[in-house]
Image (spheres, rainbow, N blue to C red):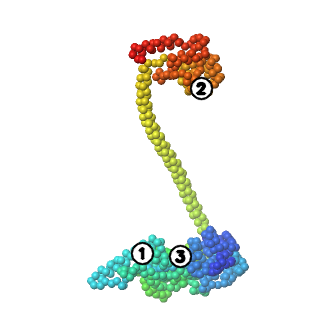
Amino acid sequence: MADLRVAGIDIKSGSPRSSRKPLYSISILGEGGVLFEAEEVTLDDVLELLRKYDVNILATDNVFEIASDSSDLRRVMEKLPPKCKLIQVTGSPNGIRPLSSVAKEAGLPSPSHSDPLGTARIVANLAMLGVGTEAVAMYPETRILVTRNRSVKQGGSGSDRWRRSIEASILSEANRIATELDKANLDYDLYVERASGGLRRAEFIVYADPEEVRRVIKESSEWSPFRIILSHSWKSKVKFPGEQFSTLPKSRPLIVGIDPGMSVGLAIMDLNGEVLSLKTMRRASRSEIIEEILNHGYPVIIATDVNPPPKSVVRIANMFDSRLIVAKYDMKAEEKRKIVMEFEEKKGVRAESSHERDSLAAALKAYQKAKNLIAKARARIEEAGLGKDADLILSKILKGTPISVALEEFSSKEVRGESKYFELRKELARADNYVKRLIMKIRELREEIERYKEIIRRKDEEISDLRRRIEYLEEMKNLEIEIDRRISARDSRIRELEKELERERWQNELLRSQLKAISERSEIPGIKIKVLSSLAKEKIDSMTESAEAILALDASGASSSVVKKLKGMGVKIILYKGSPPPPDFMKRASEEGIFVDSEENYRIAWNGVTPVIPMDEALKLLARSEEVKESQKRMEFDILGLIENYRLLLMRRDEKGET
């Protein structure tokens, strides 16, 4: 078998039946030799290693080294990886042989109790050679029977109508139960007896514990027109194929014909074409069918004349890893009778029912198809001197392994003579040709894979481009949304500013009208004052018009360097609020002929929005100036002009009648 991997184990310490957790030695072998070995691992470690190394067979010299009883053994088998078989190399428990005897027959060294790893290696090698018996887990079954409730009767002219009503109720209830089992994901087979009104009875065989089934389906009350009865039909256990044939070194390969239905027809044949069992099993479950098959050996071919095959037959074939042969077309009844009658006359076997006839016809059809291959394989096996392994080799061949490959697996390491050597070389050459064809096919498949990888790569690039385009479009969309948001905010701000501008315009018009009213009043003669927030250099530089008088709101930080600038702009008077300017500023201003004083000493009036020093205050200011003594040239105030303007103002007021 290509890629066969076998794990052999032997218990090192402890026991599944004691409180001390057992430890095992393990050896994993492949076609190339030892893949892994360990002196001491737990059972959980063993199960993990089976999955890691993709092991096909777990071999031991006693299956009860990994479990305390049959129920515990079934639970352990449920944890095995898919397609991994449990093999006891010493035979079935009812026909167990000493490991030393089995190893000696296979040409292997005798095991030692002091070397559990060596024993595990011997067990693995025995399983690699095909020695041992497989343990098959038989799972619990529960039967659900739906039938008429005999305690509810109806007589008179309406009895037929009442019967059809009950039959329709049974059909409806069977459909409901099937739906509930499907919802609960419970595997089952269904047998029914049809009637004119629906169903006379329905029987489900559910492959689960009764407790699990009762959580889904409840038994009916005694007053219901139909009855629902649950019963435990099969307890979980572990079965060894052909275990009653303790004299046989290995399980016998079988060809099995199955005719499924309410009554199951079962025909069991060996590879010589002899019928070992032909019987009808009434409403049989898979476990009952499997047990009957295992009582005679191990099936390598399962045949049926029903196309497509029922799921129960498919699952039985999958459980045994058997080759399933299905008729390409439904054989006619006349064809079946002819095949069976010829066999009955030749072998003296008689089919008692149509179910037995159909199952025997399917088995005979499969045997006739494999007959030439079996004969050819037997001749090659005898020629190779492998007669003692004939059953195992035939099993592999009938499952699809080429004859040359199967012979090579079981060939002895001893030299069998020159003629046999050359014959083996021919077989190897044919196997090489077969391998070459497989390699070419693999190469073609790899090229196909590469082509698909290239297509996938291009698709990935296209997807990446589309994703980038989507991201770009999303960015553009987000940008447009942001632009729209900002435009909306801008428009909203513009509307707010327009409203504010309108208010300011209205306020400006109001102030203009107020200013006009003020300006129409008589002006107060005096000296105009320029108001500055400070005497800092940047403030002086910002003055665009000359001024005779300045009012500094803060003169505390005035610098003497600006005095000359002020002098050049025609400033003659500096009034300040609060603290006076620094002494060096005062000194320089005095040198330049600029009068500096606090505004608290004078009254300031307003001509509209322009502050002025009234005439009387101006005269007072001039009187206080120490520079007046020099001459009026120094101050250059046109006092006569001021007096004349003041007289003219008084005259205008008299003309208007103002006081």
Numbered mark located on residue 319 in the image: 3
Which residue lies most toward the front here? 659
- Residue 351 in which image quadrant: bottom left
Q: Give the residue displayed 50% in from the left and 19% down from the top.
A: 614
Question: CA–CA distance between discs 2 and 3?
Answer: 110 Å
Secondary structure beneath label 3:
helix
Secondary structure beneath label 2:
loop
- How far across and how far down the image is residue 611, in percent? 50, 22
Q: Give the residue displayed 67% in from the left and 69% down from the top.
A: 35
- How far across and how far down the image is residue 643, in percent? 50, 12
Residue identified by numbered label 1: 177
Q: Is residue 654 above or below residue 494?
A: above
- How far across and how far down the image is residue 305, in percent? 45, 77
Relative side of 357 to 152, left or right: right
Amino acid under disc 3: Met
Numbered mark located on residue 555 in the image: 2
Amino acid under disc 2: Ala
Amino acid under disc 1: Ile
Q: Is residue 444 above or below residue 127?
A: above
Work out which quarter of the rendered image holds the C terminus and state it: top left
Tell me whether circle 1 and circle 2 mark residues in contact (CB < 8 Å). no
Which one is in front, 223 or 422? 223
Q: Give the residue displayed 61% in from the left and 84% down from the top.
A: 93
Query: Which badge, 1 or 2, is on the more N-terminal residue?
Result: 1
